[in-house]
Amino acid sequence: MSIRISPSILSADFANLERDLQRISSADLVHVDVMDGHFVPNLTLGLPVVQRLGEVSPVPLDLHLMIDDADRWAPRYAETGAFSVTFSAEAATDPVSTARAIRSNGARASVAVKPGTDLEPYLQTLDAYDMILVMTVEPGFGGQSFMPETMAKLTRARAAVSASGLDVWLEVDGGITTETIVTAVENGADTVVAGSAVYGGSPVDNIAALRAAAATVALTS
Ligand code: DX5
Ligand code: ZN
C-alpha cells in the first residue's frame, strides 16, 4: 500500500498560498487547517479562502476543521467542492448525521480525535466515515512533537478497519518527520499530514524523503 502524503499549509507562507500550493504538486492531497480561535487557541482561515484554494490547488483539498459547532459548519465546507472534510469529534453533537451531511454534499466524511479522546464510539459506527484522523499532537499549532502514546489508538483503529472490510482511511497529523512517519505507518496509518517537515526546506525533496521513509515499512513488513 502506498502512503498518501498531505502537506499542511499551516506551515506555508500565508501571503503566497497559491505559490506554495504549486510547490507541493507531487503530494497526494493538501491539508488545510481551519481554526476558529475557540475550539483551538489559534485562528487561520475560513470558507471564502478554502473556496479559492480549491480552485487553484493542483491536488485535492483535505480539510481539517478545528472549529466549534461542527454539525452546522462541516456540511458548508463540503459544499466548497473539497475532496475530504474532517470535523473534530469533540465539537460535534451528532457525528453520524454530520458525516452523512458531508457525504451528501459531495465530500469524503472524516472525524478527528484529540490525543485524549476515546475512539471506540467512532469505531462502532465506522461505516459512517471515509477516514478517521488520529491526532498525534494537541490540535492548534504546527511544529509540535509527535505523541507516541496515540499509537495504541491507531493500532486499534487499523484492527477495526481490517475486521470491517471497509475502505476507511487512517490519517495522522502532528509532529510527523522522516522518523515518526515510520512509527505511524507501522501502526496502521495510510494518510500522513506533515507541515513543518514539508515546508521547512524544499517541499519537493521533503515529500520524496517522507515517501521513501514510509516505503521502508512496506519493505520490512
Ligand atoms: C495542528 C494541525 C496540523 C499542523 C501539523 O493542529 O492540525 O495539521 O499543521 O504541523 P506539523 O506537521 O508541523 O506538526
Ligand atoms: Zn491538521
Image (tube, rainbow, N blue to C red):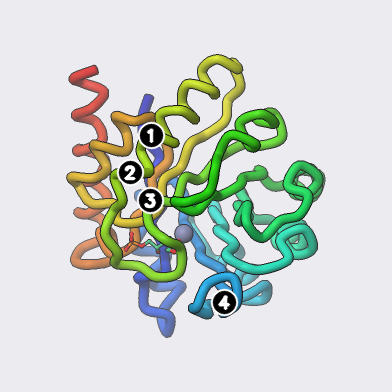
Label 3: few (<14), some (14–19) or many (≥20) C-alpha neighbours in 10 Å: many
Residue named by callout 1 = 152
Give the percent coordinates (x, y) of residue 66: 57, 65
Tag shown at residue 17: none
Q: Are marks 1 and 4 in contact (CB under 8 Å)?
A: no
Image quadrant in which you'd find residue 218: top left
Real-space Cα separation, disc 4 to disc 2, in angstroms: 30 Å
Type of the residue with mark 3: Thr
Q: Which residue, as the protein is rendered here, is positioned at the far bottom?
A: 15
Type of the residue with mark 1: Ala
Do we see residue 78 in this rendering? Answer: no
The residue drawn where x is 36% and y is 56% is 174
Tag shown at residue 136: 3
User: Mark 1 vs mark 4: which is more N-terminal?
Assistant: 4
User: Is 22 above or below relative to 176?
Assistant: below
Residue named by callout 2 = 149
Q: Is residue 80 left or right of residue 23?
A: right
Q: Is residue 106 or residue 120 the one in the foreground? A: 120
